[in-house]
Image (cartoon, helix red, strand yellow):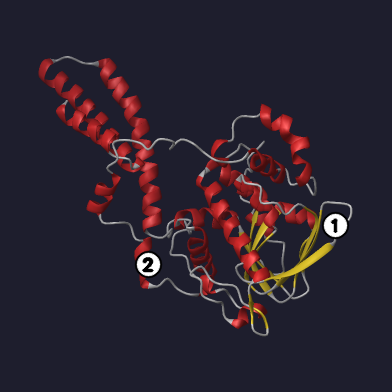
Amino acid sequence: MQLASLFFLGAALFGDMLLIRLCLSVAFFMLLLQSALSYVVDRVFLADAVAWALVTGSFHVLAAYRLARESRANRFRGRDAFRGGEPDGDDAALERFLVRRTGAGPADVARLRRRGAWVRFRAGDRVCGTEASRERFYVVVEGVARIVWRNEGVDAPEQSAHLASGDAFDLRLLNLAGVFVGFPNERFEATAATDALCFAVSTADLVDLVATHGQFSNFLTVLALDQLARALAKATDTAPGGPAPPRDSYGEREDGAWFSGARSRDFAAPYDDLESKALEPPPFATWIRDSVSPTVQPGCRNTFFPFSGRLAQAHVAERTTSGLLTAKQEASTRLLDAPSTRGGAFSPKKRPSASSAARLADLGDDAL
């Protein structure tokens, strides 16, 4: 009983969820062991103690197993999640980009990778039109894409821009993060201005990831900040003789070849020693020391997702071609009657039964 109490105390002292679950798993195992010893020594079988310890302890063991597996996947940089081996080539480049730009763990990058597909386009190929842009989110890895859009409104003019490595489209889909980021276009078209390689993931899969893995809401929020900051910098930052290349995740200018389709340094550059060390887990003693947190901070359960963001989130998840600016009038009654979407996560009407990677494979000439 004393050992069980010691591990129950550990569960109260630690703030790390894995340590909490491990302590509780061991504590309930100790209770089972005590029940077994009572039967052996005193011939007293404590049926209720055994039943409660087995049932409750099983939940903690299962949770500890899943948390430990996730920790191991991040420790080995997602190699297990990349179908049995270290990510290499384009997969490794995608991991480096998302780790640097969003802070996503390698295991979450692998989850996203399994849902998406690599798609190649030749210069002049149509990447997507309005309806297709509602169905899929694209990240340009190399090459240049030209986008044309027109926002909602009777007198809204048609606009265009060129996107290169590290840029994404359609940014309208980033409203899935639960914050209204806008881009209320009612017409959108993307064309490959050069030969291009994109990573594409379906809206349905993004919806499912946000609903089943709450951390993806934060992932999309950080990605939205990154893309909006890049867009603002490209619009306002100039260099002698013309526009300036955007900056990488550490603030250094991209090479001039970026304009013609070269990969961003965030894709191409291997991890340096500092980044590799940052991806490694802390020493065991440091992990234990930093996990001691017997109290909680006031307000730790508060979340800050505006109602406008919830409306935009639900509207984009429905993949309509217009109406983002009128989402409040169209959806407020339905959303108020729906279950809470605290934390930015929401429950789609139905989850996709399988990954959309196969459907993405026919988007370009050479889906990898």
Q: Quadrant of residue 51?
A: top left
Give the residue displayed 48% in from the left and 75% down from the top.
269
Ranked by sequence position, the earlier of labels 2 and 1 is 1
Identify the residue under disc 2: 276
Q: Is residue 366 above or below residue 343?
A: below
Q: Is residue 368 visible?
A: no
The 10 Å Cα crowd at callout 1, few under 14, some 14 to 19, many 20 or more, is: few
How far apart marks 2 and 1 lie (CA) works out to 47 Å
Front-most of residues 349 and 182: 182
Quadrant of the rendered structure where residue 272 is? Answer: bottom left
Q: Residue at x 65, y 49 (%)?
A: 175
Between 356 and 178, which is closer to the camera in this rendering? 178
Circles 2, 1 touching at the beta carbon (< 8 Å): no
Q: Is residue 356 left or right of residue 328?
A: left
Of marks 2 and 1, the one in the foreground = 1
Residue 126's place in the image compared with 151, above or below, is below
Location of the N terminus by quadrant is top left
Q: Secondary structure at mark 1?
A: loop
The residue lying furthest to the right in this view is: 154
Q: Position of residue 256 (x, y in %)?
A: 61, 82
Picture coordinates of residue 338, whole percent (x, y): 65, 29
Task: Provide residue 131's location: percent of width, then percent of height.
Answer: 79, 53
Visible residue check, residue 324: yes
The type of residue carrying mark 1 is: Ala
Q: Position of residue 254 (x, y in %)?
A: 56, 77
Query: Callout 2, which amino acid?
Result: Ser
Q: Is residue 348 left or right of residue 50?
A: right
Location of mark 1 (residue): 156
Relative vertical location of residue 241 with respect to residue 161 in this rendering, above or below: below
**Residue visible at 74% across and 56% down?**
133
Question: Callout 2: helix, strand or loop?
Answer: helix
